[in-house]
Image (cartoon, rainbow, N blue to C red):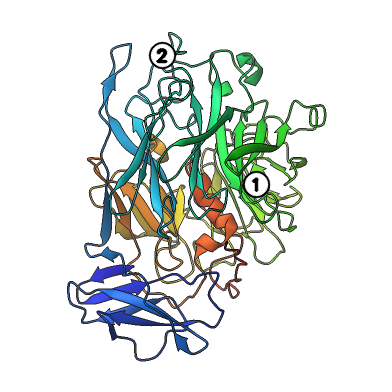
Amino acid sequence: MLQRLVELALVSWRWLGTDPNDVSFNVYRAGTLVNPTPITGSTNYFHSGAPAQADYTVRAIVNGVEQADSVHAIQFRTGYKDVPITPPAGGTTPDGVAYTYEANDASVGDLDGDGQLDFVLKWQPTNAKDNSQSGYTGNTIVDGIKLDGTRLWRIHLGRNIRSGAHYTQFQVYDYDGDGKAEVAMKTADGTTDGRGTVIGTSSADYRNSSGYVLSGPEYLTMFNGQTGAAMGTVDYVPARGTVSSWGDSYGNRVDRFLAGTAYLDGSRPSLIMARGYYTRTVIAAWDWRGGAFTRRWTFDTNSSTNSGKGYDGQGNHQLSVADVDGDGKDEIVYGSMAVDDNGNGLWTTKNGHGDAMHVGDLDPSRPGLEEFKVDEDSSKPASWMADAKTGAILWSTAADGDNGRGVSGDIWAGSAGAESWSSHADGVRNPQGTVVATRKPGSINFLSWWDGDPVRELLDDTHIDKYGTSSDTRLLTGSGVHSNNSTKATPSLSGDILGDWREEVVWPTTDNTALRIYSTPYETTTRITTLLHDTQYRTALAWQNTAYNQPPHPSFFIGNGMATAPRPTVYVP
């Protein structure tokens, strides 16, 4: 990847999990070596005096032998890269409301097996609804797009999938190990795949007069990432059953869906699809092998095994996936409770539903992972941190109504470990819950490793800031772009998708004709394996689009005073 800065060029590349620990690198411009000695301490290089059209490649040095050229660097000559996209045509709903389309959440995966990440983009109509809002919506549309803007396919989910943040959670991952990512989504009668084939009955219309879809079959479909073809469809688990059994009778809580991807056996990814979090919760784990779905397990808070144990009503508007008990297999952290890799309940804090959560090595001074979460129950702690292995509360803040926003990450070098803050709790707290700074950051949203140090920056709306105890410092303001999801003000995607371990941010342009990728212009002396090869981080990129989007966290601590980053174990076919 190449970032152009006047007469300087910042070239960055990935340190792969399959590379040797002692690998070094040479950088070439148009076939000419530009670094005086092999690069060992980082995976980026500032080249001064670079001409405007400089073209770069990188060669790894393994056991003293220089390897072949990398692919040519992706160019960010204007400070960003635009991926062209084409909005679908708008329309009018049965109640006479006209709508157009906006580019919304995105994910990444190698859809065609060429070794490069591609985008999967959700198009949302301008009349999309929260579940609490009645009314018809336009249809949700999903595109597969290469980095050069080539559209591989377009999937129309149809009239029987309502549009909004809680309805369509799409997962992009290589579930069968064939080197190409698949795309999984909830579908219904009238969904049209990327080849024009209709799932179920094309003429079916299950919308009621309030625009809700509370009857008719519900499906789970695995789509081919290269062609968009539906490869397998099964009944969605769980079925909606009696609408009121999920917490209300008008169609709000019954259609609260979450999705993720997890390495439940420690080596291969499984698909996680879930329904419900205010009362009943059901989580289904699926394997996609040999062109077919197999259900691995189902966790149901209403089952005889789980009923009465405090697992119900604990879900968030998102989930996290992590190996919280250190057995090499992923667990599902579902808000205030966790489900083990085998589908058994692992723990519950009984603190209830909330709007934001973070799971990672937030306190590097203690073993294992932690969860920081905010709650909206006025009788429960407004925020808390727990041992992610046991659910034991490490610290909490007093109840204070609906604490709707909360973040945890190492944003300040002045205090060890992650800092945590939220809407309804005072100050910035260290991993022990002590207030270490009275001024909270100017945002409570996303995080991004953006500049050259390992301390993380603040990502909110269309800008990135660096926290300071007296004020935040603006590092980037996106030009001609918009954020998504109303007041949530999230990007289409944020994460390490190109170049070294720092994170890119992807916003749609204001006219929705491009996905604009921004990447850091700052040099770093920190060398970390690409975060794509940390499975907790990689699966976090997969679930990032789920409902109320949250930033990804790796399985290890990145921040001030960090230990040498661990090297992942990567299996390749």
Q: Is residue 301 left or right of residue 64?
A: right
Label 1 sits on residue: 384
Label 2 sits on residue: 203
The image shows residue 233, relative to residue 478, as above or below, that is above
Please tell me in which quadrant of the rendered image residue 332 appears: top right
Q: Camera-side residue: 170 or 318?
A: 170
Query: How many numbered marks are there?
Result: 2
Tell me residue 154's x, y (percent).
Answer: 35, 36
Residue 421 showing in the rendered view = yes
Q: Is residue 351 left or right of residue 535?
A: right
Say which element carries label 1.
strand
> What residue do we see at 64% from left, 61% from top?
363
Tell me residue 564's x, y (percent).
Answer: 59, 75
At label 1, the amino acid type is: Trp
Furthest-left residue in this view: 52
> What residue do we see at 71% from left, 64% from top?
366
Tell me residue 41's x, y (percent).
Answer: 47, 82
The image shows residue 369, relative to residue 11, as above or below, that is above
Count neighbours of disc 1 (C-alpha within 10 A) and say few if under 14, some if 14 to 19, many if 20 or more: many
